[in-house]
Image (cartoon, rainbow, N blue to C red):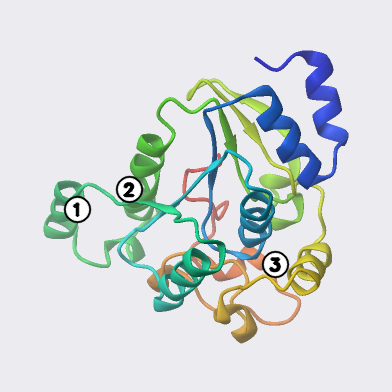
Amino acid sequence: MISTEDADILKELPAEEGLKFITSRFSSGVVFSTSLGQEDQVITDMIFKNKFPIKVFTLDTGRLFYEHYELLSNNNSKYKIKTQVYFPEPSDVEQFVNEKGINAFYHSVENRKECCYIRKVKPLNRALENAKVWITGLRAEQSENRGHMPVLEWDEERQLYKYNPLMHWSYQEVLDYLQDHRVQELSLHKKGFISVGCQPCTRAISEGENPRAGRWWWETSQKECGLHT
């Protein structure tokens, strides 16, 4: 458990020191979920270069860009540590596609959320089994929903702590870290794709648009898939 005193300390620590602090309190059960986006590449670099005892995993939805796989392979080669990959249950995908259609997520918010649940949420829940601390790359600037999230919170449903070390970072701070530490990133970012999810659900954004505007651009919603609600 994290005491109130420890929680107060953690909230004030810089991201890298916070990751070290978490692993000093938990010798096992600390995991980090990466979508291979810019924020997640920052945290991946901090974890791997310091050899923090944190399991790093990603979710392969089956609808990702080729660039995701290219970056995942490059990460594995650079850090000499493999990121664990979780996949959706084939039977769930088969049933959804056969009953509703391969691109049914375009037809309604309910269909889209069901697709996200099958391809993301259920695999995430498997990845988080027995975890004590779940680290994410969320930032307050990313969306209105995320703007109210704390650096450290207790996830009652999953019975674990959720630690968001970059919550108060600006986007410029993320870019500066990537450049200063020569961290690899998705080539898509240079083409206007800032928040990158599944290929059919992501478009490039225009200058001045919210970073999440390119996700599920055809619907008016909170722009969340269910992982961080």
| Residue 156 placement (x, y as % from top left) | 54, 20
Mark 2 residue element: helix
Q: Which residue is mark 3?
A: 210
Q: Quadrant of residue 173?
A: bottom right
The number of numbered badges drawn on the structure is 3
> Contact, CB < 8 Å: mark 1 with mark 2?
yes
Q: Compared to 86, does 10 lie above or below?
A: above
Mark 1 residue element: helix
Instruction: Tell me the kind of residue under disc 2.
Output: Glu
| Image quarter hosting the C terminus | top right
Rendered residue at 67%/70% (across/down): 183
Of label 3 and label 2, which has the lower sequence position? 2
Q: Which residue is mark 2?
A: 114
Alpha carbon distance from label 1 to label 2? 8 Å
Q: Which residue is mark 1?
A: 96
Of label 1 and label 3, which has the lower sequence position? 1
Q: Residues within 10 Å of mark 1 (few under 14, many from 20)?
A: some
Of label 1 and label 2, which has the lower sequence position? 1
> Contact, CB < 8 Å: mark 1 with mark 3?
no
* Left or right relative to 189: residue 126: left
Alpha carbon distance from label 1 to label 3? 31 Å
| Image quarter hosting the N terminus | top right
Rendered residue at 67%/59% (across/down): 39
Q: Compared to 54, does 207 lie above or below?
A: below
Mark 3 residue element: loop
| Residue 105 placement (x, y as % from top left) | 33, 61
